Image (cartoon, coloured by chain):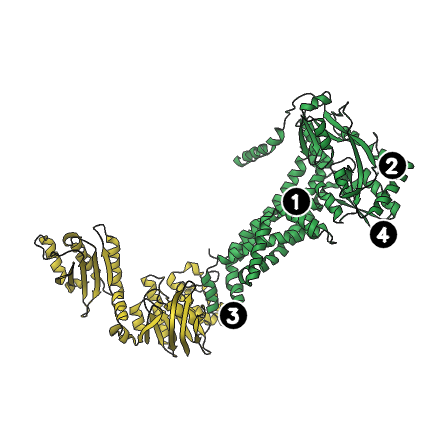
């Protein structure tokens, strides 16, 4: 009974932050002038924030990672308005009753172009020619109507070209109206545009989903051939990449909400259904879970083997090896894993054909090795030195002593230490989305961008992470009990 | 059998643990290595076993197998008693497990631990652990057994257990080198005694020779002090309980039975009624040439009579005289000396 009460209390506590996000809207927004003292949301990585800052020097600017979070903040009254591209905003207004575009705003142009590598002028030229053609023959208008007209059908385009050298295109979901992820695939104006372009070239298009900070490095390092993500061809970006002619020319608009701040429009169960079952999203989660598990398990195995080598180098290797191993562990443990991951993906393996998943496994293995080596060293050193001498005195070789005498005793300390590292590893894998791997966390982002709900996906994925971590803990504990001394 | 030649060992930091030590071990010998703490006797045995590399000199073991018993036992805590004894034969000598276990049980019977075969070492007493250590050593069929202070970590009863086993091995003709602080045991069990001092072999010979007629002054002092109980009281706040415990321990070690009671009475009478505490007081309790319990007390900075004092408490004096066979008082420089021989009238248990 008491446990039940406690559980309810805990749930309440957990929900409190969500519920307490009640309105602190400062004022009613009637015209653009009111925004001057308001809170205005913009997206990170888009170029329009500079213009917004110049137009509204008195406003507080809030940066958001994706459109969904920004819409939610507006619904809940945390911000008074947000800036976004005019193209496709109708879709957003449809999905969010009460939202409207603020009239009478000054014109801030916001165009979208495809980015290519500077040394790939040929491809850029081909795209420009293709774009000119489809603008001339009305195909572009059809595409636009398919996605953005008030009664838009949103028919998916199916590519004809299947053979030939693939055209790798970096896309980004969640930030624009041009691309959304549906059943695990990018759909929308941009994907359709690029697939048609691929057909024109006779090359199948392969989409690589990525996040904004990694896009340009991925292009420069040759992981993708083109980027399409409503990129505004600014001057500073032109220094690094080659932009096509714009495929969309519009303005920045400001979206405000007339509705009273709302918390939820659908019930929890409705949301759960939408998050897990609609459009087969559980498959998306399972796919993410698979990637998370692959990275975790392989990294634990390879990292452990590498850790053994490092530990040997530290304890028995020649001086230079010992110094190397120590230095390696210090450095790897001292760098945030996300930095290491980006470094491996965009610098070390920038031009290699390895997939992001392989790079992630390598990175996490290298990281886990340092931790495993430390655990091994500490647990071996915890065994009394006299045990080594006893083994030697019995005529055991060093290896035999280790195998029969030291290792069984070290295991008692090693497993709990390793447990901490392994649980840390699985938690750390949640950042592989940075290099465009759809792990569980990344999948959550995608689902959030589709359902406009954060609570259920985060709860579900949080629970899965917790269960995996718990599984690892319990498993290692059981193993420890199994191998441990019969008498403590 | 084993030839140690000109062995020297210098530790980093310049500590010289061994200086040009040469020693020969012949089959069937039981050699005890004695000497004060830090004299290098442990280093010697560790160098012979190969646990430490000498700075110079050689250890030639020929083709004899060595086994070593450690001060801290070093039994394998993750293995049962029987597994401790069979690990080497099974894993190294590749003897079938059943055969190894049969032999292991024989060894455990030899050291008196057959009934503990399935126990884990942590459930054993120190003496039992050390006997497991000896049995484990024997499981590898050594030609020579080296003991590095096998009983230093044990209390008296456990020491006796372990001595019993070593004695048994000696009777069976096992060649052994024993580093020990237990002089009585060394004397009983060994065929040769080596006295080490400051990294060198100072004197060696048959036990009677070394213990009864030591040739070197250093040996003499060592043996005399090892057989004495020394205690110092600096003020009236001296540690009475420590003193009494030391006396009991001394009597136990020298098989003096209940004499500690007499000794405690004498020291208490002296300390509370006679000694003036004009400076530090040194007690030395020992067995004199006639094997009688004797006591020598030095009171520093004192020139007036202590027991012969006219102010002495008469009843206390009577008790003291009853307890002692003789009391002599001597002045030497600034110190006043009391020489007492304890009366053994009260020895009847």
Q: Which callout, 3 or 4, points to the residue nearer the camera? A: 4
- State which chain is coloured yellow: B
- Of pointers 4 and 2, the one earlier in the residue sequence: 2
Residue at disc 4, secondary structure? loop
Check disc 4: other Cα within 10 Å, few if <14, some if 14-19, many if 20+.
few
Whether residue A313 is visible to the viewer of this picture, yes or no, is no
Q: Is residue B336 above or below residue B290?
A: above
* Comparing labels 3 and 2, the label whose residue is closer to the camera: 2
Q: Do labels 4 and 2 share a chain?
A: yes
* Disc 1 secondary structure class: helix
Q: Is residue B59 above or below residue A2?
A: below
- Report the disc number at residue A112: none
Q: Which chain carries label 2?
A: A
Which element is circle 3 on? helix
- Residue B20 location in percent, x, y? 38, 73
- Image colour for chain A is green
Q: Disc 4 and disc 1: Cα gap in Å?
A: 33 Å
1 and 3 marks on the same chain: no
- Residue B226 vertical placement versus B176 (above, below): above
Q: Mark 4 lies on which chain?
A: A
Q: Name the residue under label 4.
A: A164
Q: Mark 3 points at which residue?
A: B90
Tell me, yes or no, if residue A115 can be seen here: yes
Which element is circle 2 on? Answer: helix
Q: What is the distance, in whole Å, between disc 1 and disc 3 at their CAs?
A: 50 Å
Query: For residue A431, which numbered disc appears in the image?
Result: 1
Mark 2: few/some/many CA within 10 Å (<14, 14-19, 20+): some
Q: Earlier in the sequence, mark 4 or mark 1?
A: 4
Question: Residue B14 falls in which quadrant of the image?
Answer: bottom left
At 27% from the left and 68% from the top, the residue drawn is B223
* Residue assigned mark 2: A140
Same chain letter for marks 3 and 4: no
């Amino acid at each position: 009974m008491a446990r039940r009460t406690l559980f309810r209390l805990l749930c309440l506590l957990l929900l409190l932050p969500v519920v307490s996000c009640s309105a602190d809207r400062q004022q009613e927004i009637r015209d653009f002038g009111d925004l001057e003292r308001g809170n205005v949301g913009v997206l990170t990585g888009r170029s329009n924030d500079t213009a917004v800052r110049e137009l509204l020097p008195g406003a507080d600017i809030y940066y958001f990672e994706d459109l969904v979070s920004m819409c939610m903040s507006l619904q809940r009254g945390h911000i008074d308005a947000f800036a976004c591209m005019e193209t496709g905003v109708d879709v957003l207004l449809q999905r969010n009753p009460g939202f409207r575009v603020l009239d009478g705003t000054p014109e801030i142009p916001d165009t979208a172009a495809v980015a290519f590598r500077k040394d790939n002028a040929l491809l850029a030229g081909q795209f420009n020619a293709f774009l000119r053609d489809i603008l001339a023959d009305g195909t572009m208008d059809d595409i636009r109507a398919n996605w953005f007209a008030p009664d838009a059908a949103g028919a998916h385009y199916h590519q004809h070209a299947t053979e030939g050298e693939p055209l790798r295109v970096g896309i980004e979901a969640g930030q624009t109206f041009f691309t959304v992820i549906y059943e695990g695939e990018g759909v929308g104006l941009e994907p359709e545009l690029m697939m048609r372009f691929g057909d024109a070239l006779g090359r199948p298009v392969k989409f690589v989903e990525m996040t904004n900070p990694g896009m340009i490095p991925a292009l420069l390092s040759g992981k993708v051939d083109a980027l399409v993500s409503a990129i505004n061809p600014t001057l500073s970006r032109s220094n690094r990449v080659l932009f096509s002619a714009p495929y969309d020319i519009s303005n920045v608009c400001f979206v405000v909400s007339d509705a009273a701040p709302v918390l939820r429009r659908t019930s929890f169960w409705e949301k759960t259904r939408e998050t897990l079952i609609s459009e087969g999203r559980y498959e998306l989660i399972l796919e993410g879970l698979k990637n998370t598990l692959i990275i975790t398990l392989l990294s634990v195995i390879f990292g452990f083997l590498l850790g053994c080598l490092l530990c040997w180098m530290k304890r028995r290797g020649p001086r230079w090896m010992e110094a190397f191993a120590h230095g390696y562990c210090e450095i790897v443990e001292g760098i945030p894993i996300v930095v290491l991951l980006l470094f491996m993906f965009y610098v070390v393996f920038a031009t290699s054909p390895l997939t992001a998943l392989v790079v992630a496994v390598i990175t996490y293995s290298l990281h886990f090795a340092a931790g495993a080596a430390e655990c091994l060293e500490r647990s071996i050193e915890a065994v009394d030195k006299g045990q080594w001498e006893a083994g030697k005195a019995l005529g055991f070789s060093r290896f035999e002593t280790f195998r029969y005498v030291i290792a069984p005793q070290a295991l008692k300390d090693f497993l709990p230490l390793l447990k901490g590292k392994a649980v840390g590893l699985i938690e750390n894998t949640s950042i592989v989305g940075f290099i465009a791997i759809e792990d569980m966390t990344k999948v959550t982002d995608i689902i959030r961008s589709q359902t406009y709900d954060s609570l259920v996906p985060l709860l579900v994925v949080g629970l899965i992470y917790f269960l995996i971590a718990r599984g690892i803990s319990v498993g290692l504990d059981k193993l420890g009990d199994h191998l441990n001394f019969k008498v403590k | 059998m084993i030839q140690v030649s000109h062995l020297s060992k210098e530790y980093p930091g310049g500590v010289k643990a061994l200086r040009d030590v040469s020693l020969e071990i012949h089959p069937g010998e039981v050699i005890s290595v004695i000497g004060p703490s830090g004299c290098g006797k442990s280093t010697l045995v560790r160098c012979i076993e190969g646990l430490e590399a000498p700075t110079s000199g050689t250890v030639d073991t020929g083709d004899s197998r060595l086994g070593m018993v450690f001060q801290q036992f070093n039994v394998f805590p993750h293995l049962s008693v029987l597994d401790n004894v069979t690990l080497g034969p099974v894993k190294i000598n590749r003897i079938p497990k059943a055969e190894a276990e049969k032999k292991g049980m024989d060894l455990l019977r030899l050291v008196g631990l057959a009934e503990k075969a399935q126990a884990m070492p942590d459930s054993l007493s120190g003496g039992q652990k050390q006997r497991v250590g000896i049995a484990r050593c024997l499981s590898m069929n050594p030609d020579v057994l080296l003991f590095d202070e096998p009983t230093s970590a044990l209390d008296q009863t456990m020491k006796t257990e372990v001595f019993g086993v070593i004695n048994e091995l000696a009777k069976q003709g096992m060649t052994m080198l024993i580093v020990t602080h237990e002089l009585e045991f060394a004397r009983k069990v060994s065929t040769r005694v080596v006295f080490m001092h400051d990294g060198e072999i100072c004197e060696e010979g048959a036990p009677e020779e070394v213990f009864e007629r030591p040739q070197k002054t250093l040996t003499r002092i060592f043996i005399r002090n090892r057989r004495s109980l020394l205690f110092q009281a600096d003020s009236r706040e001296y540690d009475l309980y420590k003193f009494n415990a030391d006396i009991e321990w001394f009597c136990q070690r020298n098989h003096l039975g209940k004499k500690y009671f007499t000794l405690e009475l004498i020291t208490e009478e002296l300390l509370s009624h006679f000694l003036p505490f004009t400076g530090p007081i040194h007690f030395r309790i020992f067995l004199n040439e006639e094997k009688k319990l004797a006591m020598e007390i030095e009171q520093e900075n004192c020139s007036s009579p202590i027991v012969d004092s006219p102010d002495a408490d008469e009843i206390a004096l009577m008790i003291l005289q009853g307890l002692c066979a003789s009391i002599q008082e001597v002045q030497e420089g600034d110190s006043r000396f009391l020489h007492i021989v304890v009366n053994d009238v009260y020895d009847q248990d």
